[in-house]
Amino acid sequence: MSHVPQIRIPASYIRGGTSKGVFFTLEDLPERAQIPGEVRDNLLLRVIGSPDPYEKHTDGMGGATSSTSKIVILSKSRQPDHDVDYLFGQVSIDKPFIDWSGNCGNLTGAVGAFAISRGLVDPRRVPENGVSMVRIWQSNIKKTIVAHVPVINGEVQETGDFELDGVTFPAAEIQLEFLDPADGDGVMFPTGNLIDDLEVPSHVIESGTLKATLINAGIPTIFLNAQELGYSGVELQEAINGDEEAVARFETIRAHGAVRMGLIDHVDGAAKRQHTPKVAFVARPAPYTTSSGKEIKMDDIDLLVRALSMGKLHHAMMGTAAVAVATAAAIPGTLVNLAAGGGERNTVRFGHPSGVLRVGAEAALEKGDWTAKKAIMSRSARVLMEGWVRVPGDSF
């Protein structure tokens, strides 16, 4: 019996925000995997260790959660006035599937730093000491993101005193600007409404409808009222992830919301679009204890937000969903804005399972339609390991 040896591929394992993933440059991938398709997907699935019916990723680089089962591919940008093209893949844990439909805002925090370190940014644009502005083209959603990356002695600064709830240790702060963050064709509210009556099956809610804000900003997101779902907004992961009925309810809501947003034609299509849309629920401020035991006071936050990713309640907040929170909060009349107290605002502090996140957005009403100019938040990033990742040569 013959055995095909493993191959090795240059790669870095990097934390970005509250996520981590395996980073590649396009040119380092095997030639057959440099183009989108089944070969590339099979290779990257094997890198992560999916599909894994045990949901542990023991035989791969994945972490068996939506936050840690991610792939990033970078290349010199083909877009004018951009430095790097950034492609993101959300890898399913137990299915042979990679969702390329959206962005990862948390890993975006590492994109600029990795691009500088790998020489994808013109050295003339990287100061010896200061902040390098990296212009990122997000290939999944075709949007521009600007990363402000600190540099010391010509190298990316990774250590620092910036603290991000959901990340154990402090690091250097990287500010991100998501320009024109409305997803897709630029229509922020695909139904034309700030609040919709979303029709769902009666087993989800007896009335058959839920109030929902359906927004395309950062990532398509369905915002719901926590109280209408029977929640308070201070829930931690185990309250939902340990409840199979609750998880199934949220997936049903997500599927019906995706149809209403025009992302899929039928609810059955949601199974092949697991990364988007996201589902989140909001509530007025209330004190609570985070997953790490930190006490959050009512005065510390403007509202509560809990969000699901890949069918599970997130341990903190997805970066792209944070953009959606910021944008929706800036628009009077959305569920997010009302939970934050209503009125006009350009920043908001929201409580999530791991703590508090402050985000900002600029939105304007133009010719009867809401548009977002930019959303701003800070992340951090750190290289955890670099070298080569190995996969069996016959796995792709």
Image (cartoon, rainbow, N blue to C red):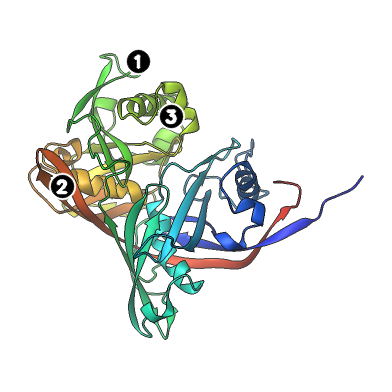
Q: Position of residue 115 (x, y in %)?
A: 46, 68
Q: Which residue is mark 2?
A: 330
Q: Which residue is mark 1?
A: 201
Quadrant, the N terminus: top right
Mark 2 secondary-structure assignment:
loop
Where does label 3 land, which residue? 247
Which dot, 3 or 1, sits closer to the camera?
1
* Residue at 61% across, 63% down: 28
User: Residue 320 or 59: which is nearer the viewer?
Assistant: 320
Q: Amino acid at mark 2?
A: Ala
The quadrant holding residue 78 is bottom left
Is residue 286 visible from the viewing direction of this image?
Answer: no
Q: Earlier in the sequence, mark 3 or mark 1?
A: 1
- Ranked by sequence position, the earlier of labels 2 and 3 is 3
The disc labelled 3 sits on which kind of residue?
Val
Mark 1 or mark 2: name the one nearer the start of the chain.
1
